[in-house]
Image: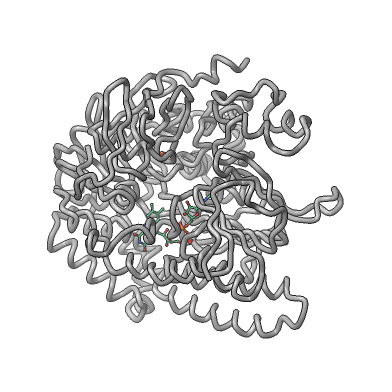
Amino acid sequence: MFRRLAPISQAVSFEFEGRPMTAEKGESVALALLASGIQSCRDSVVSGEPRGPYCLMGACFECLVVIDGVPSCQGCQVEVKAGMRVVRQSGARSMDEATPS
Amino acid sequence: MTASVIAHAGDLVELYDVIVVGAGPAGMSAAALMSAEGLSVLVLDENPAPGGQIYRHITLNAQTKRPYLGAAYWAGRPIAAVFMTSALTYAPRCRVWSLDSANPSLDEPYARVGISLGGVARHVQARRVILATGALERPMPVPGWTLPGVMTAGAAQIALKSAGLVPSGRVVLAGCGPLLYQLAVQLKDAGADIVALLDTGGGLRRGWRYLPSFLVSPYALKGAALLFKARRSLRVVSGVRRLQVEGRDRATAVRFKTDRFEETLTVDHLLLHQGIIPDTALANSAGCALEWNETLRAFQPRTDDRGCSSLPDIFIAGDGARMAGALASAEAGRAVALAVMAELSPGDAHPFEARRQGTLRECARLQRGRPFIDTVYLPARHFLAPEDESTVVCRCEEVTVGAIRRAARRGVTGPNQLKVFTRCGMGPCQGRMCGSTVAELLADEQGTEPGDIGTYRLRPPIKPLRLSEIAALPHGDADTFAVTGLHPENATDASPSLTERALCDDR
Ligand SMILES: Cc1cc2nc3c(=O)[nH]c(=O)nc-3n(C[C@H](O)[C@H](O)[C@H](O)COP(=O)(O)OP(=O)(O)OC[C@H]3O[C@@H](n4cnc5c(N)ncnc54)[C@H](O)[C@@H]3O)c2cc1C
Ligand code: FES
């Protein structure tokens, strides 16, 4: 997990898997989760292994989460907002069901 | 004068003289210079504030609150200040997902840039485009690198710069390159418990012939001071040959091996880094020719001495063109801006040319000593083309070293065919995390060089885009169908990103 060097000055409340969380205004969802002790935010597509943010710069797509019902959001590129409901992204991408292969 | 900062796609005009992608040192410097000469300039960057990688968040951080970021970081202040007081348009939080060169025969007289801003996608046009998209960290596939708790060293730096977060518990850094050391020192100064820095580099023998020019370069003193500080304050283990991450649901230990001993360290965080390579995604998707840089062992866009790519209206500056470092990137941005100004100026181009020559000289001076660093810090062979068959290379689709090597022995012709056979590179990251390893592995098996193997050809969108955004683009249904394979009325807000759609359709 990550620790804050300074206490939160402008708190934003959001939810992860139904649990209340607090973040600093302006930070990304991925950073907010890391600072709340959550290292893994999704399960991999093939073997279902736990995965968590890896690059924090939008390149790796390991930070994918479901935000307010929208799947495949890049947690490191989305600013955390009050009242956001964030859920783990599990299993195969929802696209796999929707797309004929 | 202040830059006009926009948050909505509706605030964009149809056509700009120059669009700059990236607000790092290269993009900021290029844009400031061109706007001072009266060109209309639009700067697009996905981050919330200017600065790029090195100066990330520079306008939002206070030196008194985050002193541990160091002098090289605070040097970005004046560059960002000039940028923010230039007569230009700047769109932060703006993702650039496509780029097309002008095509007069198809009645497309200008370059076209696909952007997503404030939840709305649009195309914007420009006479010239400057890509200043910077670099990515070179992937470092080792057994267990997909476990939570393993991150890139750059990621830890981003957490520090943009949110004042430090990894807690026991932290180990592993890999090679000057940035790894810089980061270790930065994190240590910020209060992280750095248990060890495991140096996997082994290039000192190769680099000697470049030593004299390095010693008289701007890098020498800074580099020596950094190494001294790291070695004095941290446990540095040199000559690490093997590295393995252990743990079930998260990384709990790192096992490593040198020529002399083996050891296991318990960890809470492992930070990997083996240098940086140009981010070629946009250039690649636009169809700019790429070339293999043997010294850096990386693909880079082919550019001429003006910074022009193989497409006449697309220029490339900074680390996205070739690795040069922050100071040289800023200078390179100015040089490319002057080349563009010379092309666009209705009158005499001579004054620009004279200034450009001066900028290039400064750029060369700043890069003296670079060959030594590049050579010495080149990752060891077995970290570029790993041997361990079970190591995951493609993190998205979980394709292993073994699967790729077997496919190579069966004679796959290159990364694009490998993708079809194994799904390697087919996930949402579009090969950003595996492309360089794949090229190294195929070359290794086929007894050739990555330059002969090539890399993935990217298709737009190169950044995620919702189908609803595509659907709302002011263009015909035929366009939407061509890109997505879907009819726009089927798109909803909950649609998965188009990147995924495009990639899934790729099957
Ligand atoms: C993670 C990381 C950390 C680094 N830290 C340091 C450091 O501490 N010190 C140091 O000396 N060097 C550092 N470097 C090297 C450093 O990047 C450069 O030398 C310098 O920042 C290069 O400047 P640039 O202007 O070429 O690109 P950058 O500074 O990388 O700027 C590129 C910008 O373009 C944006 N961008 C790219 N593609 C798109 C797109 N499609 N849409 C929208 N925006 C886009 C990026 O988000 C970024 O803001 C780091 C590199 C990386 C990858
Ligand atoms: S952590 Fe890599 S894309 Fe978000």
Q: Vertically, is B352 above or below A76?
A: below
Residue B11 versus residue B295 in the image, above or below: above
The answer to whether B24 appears left or right of B497 in the picture is left
Q: Residue B400: x, y in percent?
A: 42, 29
Residue B355 left/right relative to B172: right
| In the foreground, B50 or B223 | B50
Residue A63 can be seen, yes or no: yes
Residue A87, picture quadrant:
top left
Residue at figure coordinates x 33%, y 32% from the top left: A52
- In which quadrant of the rendered view does residue B190 lie? bottom left
Is there any visible trace of residue B285 in the rendered image? no
Q: Looking at the picture, how far across and down is residue B203, in whole percent?
A: 33, 60
Residue at the image position 70 percent from the left and 49 percent from the top: B100
Rendering quarter of residue B183 = bottom left
Residue sitting at x 32%, y 35%: B145
x, y (%) of residue A11?
27, 40
Above or below, comparing residue B169 to residue B358 in the picture: above
Horizontal side, residue A29 vs residue B285: left or right: left
Judging depth in this view, the residue of B406 and B285 nearest the camera is B285
